[in-house]
Image (cartoon, grey):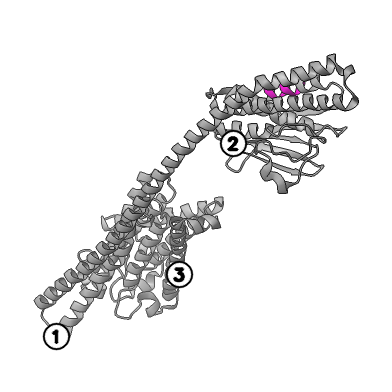
C-alpha cells in the first residue's frame, strides 16, 4: 500500500481527502457537544458564539453529533459490522428528526425541537426552534450520508449533488452573516439559521464529499487529467476572490469611503481584473505543458521510428543467420557422415593393419564426428524452432511429461528415478514445440541425477504474484553455481565438463527459444550438489 501511495498521486490525494473527512467529522461532533454543554451550563458563548447572535437549537446540536458520528464511523471502521450498524442508526435518526421538523412547518408540529432544555428554550428572547433551512439541510445531508454506502455511480453522484445543496445553503448563510444581510440566513419570517450551524453544515458537507474522493463530484477534481488540475488551481480563487472583494466592498461602504454604486463598480472591476489574471496564469501554465508534451511526443515518435527500424534490421539479420545456420548444418552433414562412416569402416575392416596408436586416432575421429553430428543436429533443431509456424491449442503437459519420462526410463532401464508429475497441467501452446521443451528439461534433469541413487525429478506448477501459474522442473542432481547462471541458456555453453556429463550445451538454449516463442520466460535456481529447479511461464498461463 505504501508503495502504491508513493507512486500514485491520485491515491495519495484521495487518502489526504479521506483523512480530512475524518477530522471534519470529529469537528462536527465536537461542535454539537460544545453547544449541548452550553445549553446544560446556560453558557451564552457556547450556545450562540456571540451574545448578539441566534443560539443553536439543542436538537440541531444533537443532529450534528449523530451526523458527525455516522460519518466518522463510516470512514474509520468501515469493515466492523457493529460500527456500520451504529452509523446507519445515527444517519437514520438525523433523517427522521429533520423530516419531523419539516412536517412541523407544514402544520404537523410535534415539538421535537423543544424536547431538550425546553425551559431555557422558551426563556430566549426569540423562542428558539430548528430553522426550516436547517431542517432541510439535515434532510439532504442525511441522504448524502446514506449515499456513502452505495457503489452505484449514479447513486453516489445524485446524493453528492444533494450534499452540494447543503454546502450552498451554508455558504449563503455565512455570507449573510459576513455582509450583515440577515435575510440570507432565514426563510421568510421564520427563525434564522445560527452562525455556527452554518459553519457546521459547511464542515459536514465537505466531509461527506471528501469521504468518496474517487467517485461522483470529486472524481473530476482528484485526477491527473488537465481538467482536474485546472479545477484544483481555480477553486481557491473562485471561492476566495469573491468573498474578499464582497467583504471589502461592505467595509468601505460602512466606513463612508464610497456609495453603493461606486462599491459595486469597484468590486466588479477588481473581480474582472482578478479573474483575468487567473485565466492568463492558467493559460500560460497550459501552454507550457502543451509545449513540453509536444516535445515529449515528438521524441517518443522518433524513438519509435528508430526502434521499428532497428527491429526490422534485427529481424532481417536473424532470418539471414537462421538461413545460414540451416544451410551450413545441412551441407556439413553429408561430408561429415562420409568421414565418420569411412573411419568406422576402416577401424572395423583394417584394424589388424594398424598399430595401437593408429586405432586410437581412428576412434577419436569417429567420436569427434559423432559429436559434431550431434552439434549439427542441435543447430538444426534450433533453426527449425525459430522458423516453424506456431499452432497453439490445448496441450496436456502432464501426459506429455509422463510419456517422455517413460522413454527416458526405457533408454536406461538399470536406473531407478522417481518422476513425480503433477496431474491436470493443461496449457495453450504449440504441442510439438512444447514437447521439445519438456523433453530437453526432463532429459537435462535425468542426466544430472545420474550420480544419485535416490534420483528424483518433479514437474509441477505454483501460483505467481499475479495469480497465474509458473511451471517448474526440479531435480536433486548435481546442481550448479548460481554465479554462472547467466551462461545457462547460451548455445554451446556448458557448466560441466564432457567427462562429467556428456552433452552439446544446446538443450537449454532450445528451451529458452521455445519459451520465448510462447511469450514467456525461463529461469533457474540451484545449489551445487543440491539439485536445480527450472521455472518457465507460457503467455496466458504464467505471465
Circle nearer the viewer, 3 or 1: 1
One can see residue 425 in this view? no
| Nearer to me, 321 or 217 | 321
Give the number of marks: 3
Q: In which quarter of the image is residue 248?
A: bottom left
Q: State if disc 2 and disc 1 touch (CB < 8 Å).
A: no
**Quick one: SS at disc 1?**
loop
- Of badges 1 and 2, the one in the foreground is 2
In 3D space, how far apart are the residues under numbered discs 2 and 3 (Cα atoms)?
54 Å
Q: In this view, does 492 lie above or below 142?
A: above
> Which callout, 2 or 3, points at the residue further toward the start of the chain?
3
SS class of the residue under badge 2?
loop
Q: In which quarter of the image is residue 425?
A: top right
Quadrant where the C terminus lies? top right
In this rendering, the answer to whether 64 lies above or below 382 is: below
Give the spatial CA distance, label 3 vs label 1.
40 Å
511 relative to 61 in the view: left or right = right
Among numbered discs 1 and 2, the one appearing first in the sequence: 1
Which element is circle 3 on? helix
Indicate yes or no whether the magenta region holds residue 482. no
Residue 30 shows which numbered tag?
A: 3
Say which of 330 and 314 sits in front: 330
Q: Mark 2 points at which residue?
A: 542
In this rendering, would 419 be left or right of 283?
right
Res 108 visible: yes
What residue is pinned by disc 1? 256
- Mark 2 is surrounded, within 10 Å at the Cα level, by few (under 14), some (14 to 19) or many (20 or more) other residues, namely many
Range of magenta residues: 400-406
Residue 384, image x and y in percent?
58, 25
Amino acid at each position: 500500500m505504501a508503495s502504491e501511495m508513493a507512486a500514485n498521486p491520485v491515491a495519495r490525494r484521495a487518502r489526504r481527502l479521506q483523512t480530512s473527512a475524518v477530522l471534519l467529522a470529529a469537528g462536527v461532533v465536537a461542535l454539537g457537544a460544545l453547544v449541548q454543554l452550553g445549553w446544560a451550563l446556560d453558557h451564552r458563548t457556547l450556545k450562540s458564539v456571540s451574545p448578539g447572535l441566534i443560539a443553536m437549537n439543542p436538537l440541531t446540536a444533537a443532529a450534528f453529533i449523530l451526523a458527525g458520528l455516522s460519518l466518522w464511523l463510516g470512514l474509520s471502521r468501515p469493515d466492523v459490522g457493529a460500527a456500520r450498524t451504529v452509523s446507519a442508526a445515527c444517519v437514520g435518526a438525523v433523517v427522521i428528526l429533520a423530516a419531523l421538523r419539516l412536517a412541523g412547518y407544514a402544520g404537523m408540529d410535534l415539538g421535537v425541537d423543544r424536547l431538550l432544555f425546553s425551559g431555557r428554550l422558551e426563556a430566549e428572547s426569540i423562542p428558539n426552534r430548528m430553522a426550516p433551512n436547517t431542517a432541510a439541510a439535515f434532510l439532504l445531508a442525511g441522504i448524502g450520508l446514506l449515499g456513502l454506502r452505495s457503489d452505484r455511480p449514479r447513486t453516489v453522484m445524485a446524493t453528492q449533488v444533494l450534499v452540494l445543496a447543503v454546502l450552498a445553503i451554508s455558504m449563503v448563510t455565512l455570507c449573510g452573516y459576513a455582509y450583515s444581510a440577515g435575510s440570507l440566513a432565514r426563510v421568510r419570517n421564520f427563525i434564522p439559521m445560527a452562525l455556527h450551524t452554518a459553519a457546521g453544515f459547511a464542515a459536514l458537507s465537505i466531509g461527506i464529499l471528501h469521504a468518496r474522493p474517487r467517485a461522483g463530484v470529486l472524481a473530476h477534481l482528484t485526477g491527473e487529467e488537465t481538467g482536474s488540475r485546472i479545477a484544483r488551481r481555480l477553486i481557491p480563487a473562485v471561492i476566495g476572490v469573491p468573498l474578499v472583494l464582497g467583504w471589502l466592498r461592505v467595509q468601505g461602504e460602512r466606513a463612508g469611503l464610497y456609495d453603493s454604486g461606486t462599491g459595486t463598480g469597484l468590486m466588479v472591476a477588481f473581480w474582472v481584473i482578478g479573474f483575468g489574471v487567473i485565466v492568463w496564469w492558467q493559460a500560460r501554465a497550459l501552454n507550457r505543458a502543451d509545449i513540453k508534451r509536444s516535445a515529449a511526443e515528438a521524441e517518443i515518435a522518433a524513438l519509435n521510428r528508430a526502434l521499428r527500424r532497428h527491429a526490422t534490421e534485427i529481424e532481417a539479420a536473424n532470418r539471414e543467420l537462421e538461413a545460414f545456420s540451416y544451410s551450413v548444418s545441412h551441407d556439413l552433414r553429408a561430408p561429415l557422415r562420409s568421414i565418420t562412416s569411412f573411419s568406422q569402416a576402416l577401424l572395423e575392416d583394417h584394424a589388424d593393419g594398424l598399430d595401437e596408436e593408429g586405432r586410437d586416432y581412428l576412434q577419436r575421429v569417429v567420436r569427434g564426428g559423432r559429436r559434431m553430428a550431434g552439434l549439427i543436429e542441435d543447430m538444426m533443431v534450433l533453426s527449425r524452432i525459430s522458423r516453424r509456424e506456431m499452432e497453439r491449442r490445448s496441450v496436456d503437459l502432464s501426459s506429455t511429461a509422463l510419456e517422455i519420462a517413460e522413454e527416458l526410463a526405457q533408454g536406461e532401464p538399470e536406473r531407478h528415478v522417481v518422476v513425480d508429475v503433477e496431474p491436470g497441467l493443461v496449457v495453450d501452446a504449440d504441442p510439438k514445440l512444447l514437447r521439445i521443451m519438456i523433453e530437453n528439461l526432463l532429459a537435462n534433469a535425468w542426466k544430472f541425477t545420474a550420480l544419485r541413487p535416490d534420483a528424483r525429478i518433479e514437474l509441477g506448477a505454483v501460483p505467481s504474484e499475479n495469480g497465474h501459474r509458473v511451471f517448474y522442473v526440479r531435480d536433486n542432481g548435481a546442481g550448479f553455481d548460481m554465479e554462472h547462471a547467466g551462461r545457462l541458456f547460451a548455445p554451446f555453453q556448458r557448466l560441466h565438463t564432457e567427462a562429467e556429463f556428456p552433452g552439446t550445451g544446446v538443450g537449454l538454449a532450445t528451451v529458452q527459444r521455445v519459451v520465448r516463442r510462447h511469450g514467456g520466460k525461463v529461469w533457474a535456481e540451484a545449489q551445487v550438489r543440491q539439485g536445480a529447479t527450472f521455472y518457465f511461464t507460457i503467455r496466458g498461463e504464467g505471465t
